[in-house]
Amino acid sequence: MTATTTTAGAEPGTLSFLWRRRLDRYPTGGERYARLVLAVLATVVIYYEQYTLGAVSTLVQTELHMSFLFLLTSLAIGNLIGAFGSLAAGLADRLGRANIVVYGMLVIGAVTAFGVTLVTDKWVFVVITTIVGVMEGMLLVATPALVRDFSPQMGRARAMGFWNIAPPAGSLLASAVAAATLSSLVSWQSQFMISGIAGIVISIIALFFLKELSPELRDQAAVDEGDRELLEARAASGQVQTHVEHPWRQLMHADVILPAIGFSVALLFYYTIVGFAPVLFTTVWHMDLTDANSVTAWAWGFNVLVSLTYGSLVDKFRVRKPWILAGAILCLGTQVYMLTLVGTDASYLHLAIAMAVLATSWAGFAVPWYAAYTETVEARNPALTATGLAIWAWIIRVVVFVSFLVTPFVVHSANTLVNAEPYVAAAKQAKEAGNPIGGDLARHLAEIEHASVSIIGEWRTWMAIAAVCAVALALTVPVLKGPWRPSTARRMQEEHDRERDAAIAELHAH
């Protein structure tokens, strides 16, 4: 017994397709992958828009007269406010996910392309990007919830690996587009215009094609595609009973909270790379902006490649925890190695390889972690998946808030070096003209020279803190639901199959 597919009101000649996106049938095969592709594509563009600032942060600082401290503080506050947008997205368990994505993307794209690009004041820039950040916080809960809805647990790591390409792919797009176009387009506004238009285009595509499961289907946990008949039969017969009262109280438990904290702090250096890779590579290894974005692009390229391929391997062994732990260990080791490169004359290739390995480790623990975390939430209440993801998103944004707030006090010399170009240029002109260098210019040059020495120790301190934070992830792995051994996972699968077959037989008997 199966239900028929409907889109609840998408009759010819009506405009109901603008808001009604319901699927009463659990998609499988090519249809399921197509719906996953659209959800992931939307997420890639959302992250692209979010990470555009990181690719041109030094240009924005210079033109809008921002200090490094001002930029980091404003980003910190934006992430804190955006955290509450993520909490609000927990309503997607009751109101649905798809419309949040479609119309949220449309607004963000329009503001990014036609609002941010007109800004000439740093305070206006902060206000607009903060408002956009709140909406992005909502979308970045709704999209993984959609991915979870369309992926049974036995394919969850592959689906979440697919979704995990979104952050690195967004960063890759931001870095690659900047590296390819900044030399000709020059202005930082051009990058926001490009990413905003991309957001508008994808939102229009989503308007026509993005769908979501009916509440009766999404509020059940699917272990594999063989559960489809049972899920649809229960939904059609009205047997699905959901308990969404007091959602926060239901999920405020150690197995939900602690892993979210461990995962969030383990990505401390990731946030640094996303937001300030140009600052790091230009102040420590004296790269120009194009090379800095190019090194970052290599890192995100490897992260995308691992995310696309790694999930299938994780699903094959049917366990998550050993893979998360292995990724955390690789992350720790690579960060320690990168710390030793600070203060050396490491080549472009050397840094690109180190960043590629580090980005690989991020995908190495993130892909199985997303699968394990959503399955842990499902074990408590599958009807509260978006709420569980909202808790994770709130925690991760609070951690980003703290990191952005603390970074300028640890790496305080970066502010002097980021704003050094006018003084260096003035000194060069004075030298070419045979004029003496004195007064304020001499003082600024002395500060720049001192900062060039101090920055090495400051970045070492920050990278050491980030390495220690990677340990937190390893410590929280045992709290997640799920077995450590593949043999145990196989026995659990066999037991589930027997229970499913018995339930289907009972439904047919009635």
Image (cartoon, rainbow, N blue to C red):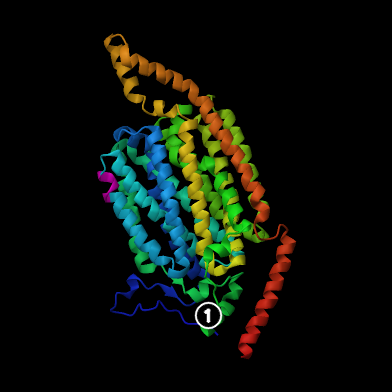
What secondary structure predominates along the stretch shown in magenta? helix
> For this view, does 291 lie left or right of residue 255?
left
- In the image, is residue 428 above or below residue 275? above
- Give the residue at mark 1: 235
Residue at 41%, 44% in the rendered image:
77
Between 227 and 395, the one nearer to me in the picture: 395
Residue 107 location (% of width, % of height): 32, 57
Residue at 29%, 43% in the rendered image:
124
Residue 136 location (% of width, % of height): 40, 54
- In the image, is residue 507 above or below residue 270? below
**Is 405 covered by the magenta stretch?**
no
Residue at 26%, 43% in the rendered image:
119
Is residue 150 visible in this depiction of the protein?
no
Quadrant of image for the N terminus: bottom right
Residue 66 location (% of width, % of height): 34, 34
Q: Residues within 10 Å of mark 1 (few under 14, many from 20)?
A: many
Between 28 and 97, the one nearer to me in the picture: 97
**Residue farthest along the bottom direction in this orientation:** 510
**Residue 227 image-quadrant placement:** bottom right
Q: Amino acid at mark 1?
A: Ala
Residue at 40%, 34% in the rendered image:
69
> For this view, does 494 lie left or right of residue 94?
right
Residue 183 location (% of width, % of height): 32, 35
**Residue 73 image-quadrant placement:** top left
Q: From which residue to which does the magenta span run?
A: 114-118
Quadrant of image for the C terminus: bottom right
